[in-house]
Image: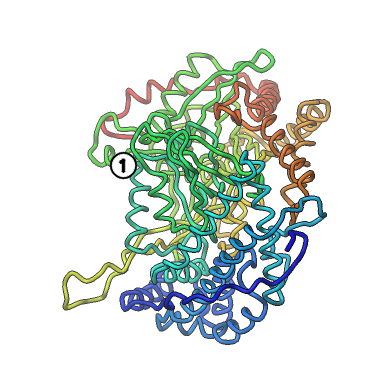
Amino acid sequence: MSWGQSQAVPAKAAAPPALLAPTPEQMEASRHLAQYLIQNHYRKVPLNDSLSQQIFDRFLDNIDNNRSYFTASDVERLRKEYGNRLDDDFITGNPEGGFAIYNQFLKRARQKMAFMMKALKTSTFDFTKPETLELERSKTAPWSVDLAALQDQWRKELKYQYLNMKFTGEKGKSIKSALEKSFRNRLNLFNQQKPEDAFVAYMNAVTTSFDPHTDYFSPDMYENFQIDMSRSLEGIGAKLQMENEYTVVNEIIPGGPAFKGNQLKKGDQIIGVGQGENGEIIDVVGWRINDVVKKIRGPKGTVVRLKVLPASQANKGPARIIRIVRAKVDLQEQAAQKKIIIEKGKKIGVIVLPSFYLDFEGERQNKTNYTSTTRDVIKILNELNAAKVDGIILDLRDNGGGSLEEAVNVTGLFVGQGPVVQVSNALGGKMVLKDEEYPALYTGPLVVLVNRYSASASEIFAAAIQDYGRGVIVGDRTFGKGTVQSIVSIKRPFSMFTNQPDLGQLKLTVAKFYRISGGSTQHIGVLPDIVLPSMIDPEVVGEDTYTSSLPWTTISRADYTPVGSVSRADISMLKSEFKARAAKDSQYQAYLADLATLNRIRNKKSVSLQEKNFETESKTLKQIQDRWGDENLETGKKKKTDFIIQETAGIMDDLIDLKAQETDAPMLQKPAAQLIKAMPLGKK
């Protein structure tokens, strides 16, 4: 058989592993999960056949996102049997339907791995034939009509994986050897699946049918979640989650090794892990998240190498190898930092804020020197005042949020005391969170820089600045996460027995954030006043990429008075000036041209399996990343010049000139140091 032909290959007969079935504890946990979701989730989902179909479709999409395991007849049979009963099973806490679907997935997954190993040994490679592989079949392609058509899909996937490994740096024989080992390991994983694997996979389909941030944690998974939240375990400083068969980077923790290395990004898919400088990179596609985490963690000072499919390339490859030295999260590295840049003779202060951090324990104990974003920003404002800057850029790019309290307080440093954000709970109750302690320390020209990774608390800050008319929001549309989660233990109502097995935990969406103007940040995010596009792929990163995300809605406006530092007329004028300047800026036009090329490649639903075309696209992606990425691909070190900051400084220059025509008022109402001295010890 050649690689240019399609032919069904019968799988070798072998005694299949026993079918998975739910344990008594999982049946019990399922009943309690249903009660928690129905009674306490922010979204009140109708319990009908529509929910059943949503759970069914989402489960199939989760375990077979690329339509690479089930045939059309498989889906038709499963839908007929389970499509309209999963809602009833959910109410009664019966996960057996989910287990039946998962068992069918495992059966076909084992067939696929056996096919791949045999094809790898018996097939010849023909990379001159003009073939393509659809990479996003879940939205565009029908299910394969039969096993022969499915095996033709597998054959193309094998060619794609070979090319991907080749242009990651692997050589001929070692590619086949690495692929065979990967397929054999995955077959072993499929043969060693436990009831917990099926239960967690199915419960994930149930919980994410309510919203994408509601998750079930088995007892083992929750232990890892707690470690991630403590940020104290030695590792790489990244939160991971499972999406389909892939381990995906969910958050880069400020101050951690991955944050300082600046190569690993939110949305990257980790497909391999290697120990040390030269250790073999083990394929981890399809692994349990706990097992991947154990591979990545390790003692301080040791090296781990990650093989990733970058989110910036829509996870299409070629893969990159990222070297990270394990260490503990350094809280100083996540602290606010400043620098001063010169733009056309003007001094511009740049405050980089990686997160809204707070030492909760230090605050609780009323310590005098506990770490907080507010304290650090006050100190920086004092220093920028002493340097007599003409304007300030607050850089919230990649800031995934953090402490809501700190977001509210820092907002006060720029707008003064008053409402910052509204919170609505599942019962319809509304609460307005206000800054009640801090006067406006800075009243001069302000630009807030955001991107697609700016989320949660960052969006609250940016939205308040925009609603107050306090500054100009520049960059990409933000992530759009405007919901609040709470962790609840799944507890038995009563029990006569001690030492019963733990039932796990539920991360539950219980509330929603709203801007003081009444609109939510949910789903849409904060729209910039002036768009300065980044290389982040909006089709991969963002709340609106989740099919079950809560919608954008509105509530009543809070009682606040805009400060009017920047009017809509000002924004219009700044847009016009930026557009005119950008049209003449050859560097910016080259950037837009490369971004258009990148988007064209990312938006393609298929990839060429001709080696020449594959190589051309791979080189193009690398060249664009080399030119405009914020790090050197070889060393991982940040480049000396930040292109986006340079462009933002031009906008700030325009804003300074515009404001200078209106007033000569001093930019700082009083030195920040005075506020620090006036603070009672132990207060914020």
In the image, taking residue 368 as reference, residue 403 lies left or right, namely: right
Q: Give the mark count.
A: 1
Q: Residue at x 70, y 59 (%)?
A: 156
Q: 576 and 20: which one is in front?
A: 20
Q: Say if residue 518 shows up in the picture.
A: no
Specify the amino acid type for callout 1. Answer: Phe
Quarter of the image for residue 606 reads bottom right
Q: Residue at x 64, y 63 (%)?
A: 66
Q: 76 and 371: which one is in front?
A: 76
Q: Say if residue 23 shows up in the picture.
A: yes
Q: How is the image coloured?
A: rainbow
- In percent of width and height, residue 503 lies at 31, 69
Q: 203 and 615: which one is in front?
A: 615
Q: 487 and 133: which one is in front?
A: 133
Image quarter (top left, top right, bottom left or bottom right) of the C terminus = top left
Quarter of the image for residue 69 reads bottom right
Q: Which residue is mark 1?
A: 360
Q: Residue at x 79, y 43 (%)?
A: 612
Asked if 89 appears above or below 486 in the picture, the reply is: below
Asked if 297 appears above or below 122 in the picture, the reply is: above
10 Å crowding of disc 1: few (<14), some (14-19), many (20+): few
In the image, taking residue 49 as reference, residue 304 lies left or right, namely: left
Helix, strand or loop at label 1? It is: helix
- In percent of width and height, residue 583 lies at 83, 30
Q: Residue at x 53, y 78 (%)?
A: 46
- In percent of width and height, residue 337 lies at 47, 26
Asked if 153 appears above or below 267 in the picture, the reply is: below
Image quarter (top left, top right, bottom left or bottom right) of the N terminus = bottom right
Quarter of the image for residue 10 reads bottom right
- In percent of width and height, residue 642 lies at 63, 26
Q: Residue furthest front?
A: 122
